[in-house]
Amino acid sequence: MRLLTLLGPDGVGKTRVSLEVARQMRADFADGVSFVSLASIHDPTWVPSTIAQVIGLIEASAKRM
């Protein structure tokens, strides 16, 4: 698994760039690519479980128990 994190100020196009990179790289990864928006996460302890849920490692009902 590879993880790419884009950081920067609001409005510079991080989401647009990441979605385009994911679209272009999709064929290069047998298991596909995923976009995980962390914009609504205010507590860094939720980052790992949010990523795990989006990529299917844990079920949504198990999150934040």
Image (cartoon, rainbow, N blue to C red):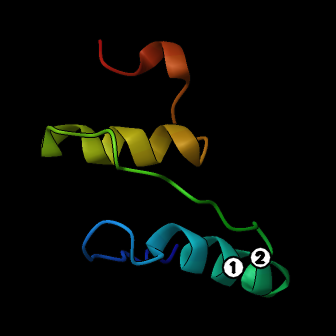
Write the residue at 65% across / 83% down.
21
Task: In the rendered view, tell whether residue 6 sits above or below residue 38.
Answer: below
Q: CA distance from mark 2 to mark 1?
A: 5 Å
Where does the image place residue 38, in percent across and percent down from the top left?
36, 50
Q: Three-letter amino acid code at disc 2?
A: Arg
Task: In the rendered view, tell whether residue 19 sits above or below residue 28.
Answer: above
Labels 2 and 1 touching (C-beta < 8 A): yes
Left/right placement of residue 52 relative to residue 23 reads: left
Where does the image place residue 11, in percent across and percent down from the top left?
38, 69
Q: Which residue is mark 1?
A: 20
Q: Nearer the viewer, residue 26 or 6?
A: 6
Q: Quadrant of the C terminus?
A: top left
Q: Which residue is mark 2?
A: 23
Q: Nearer the viewer, residue 16 or 34?
A: 16
Where does the image place residue 37, in percent across and percent down from the top left?
46, 51
Task: List the single residue furthest toward the right.
Answer: 27
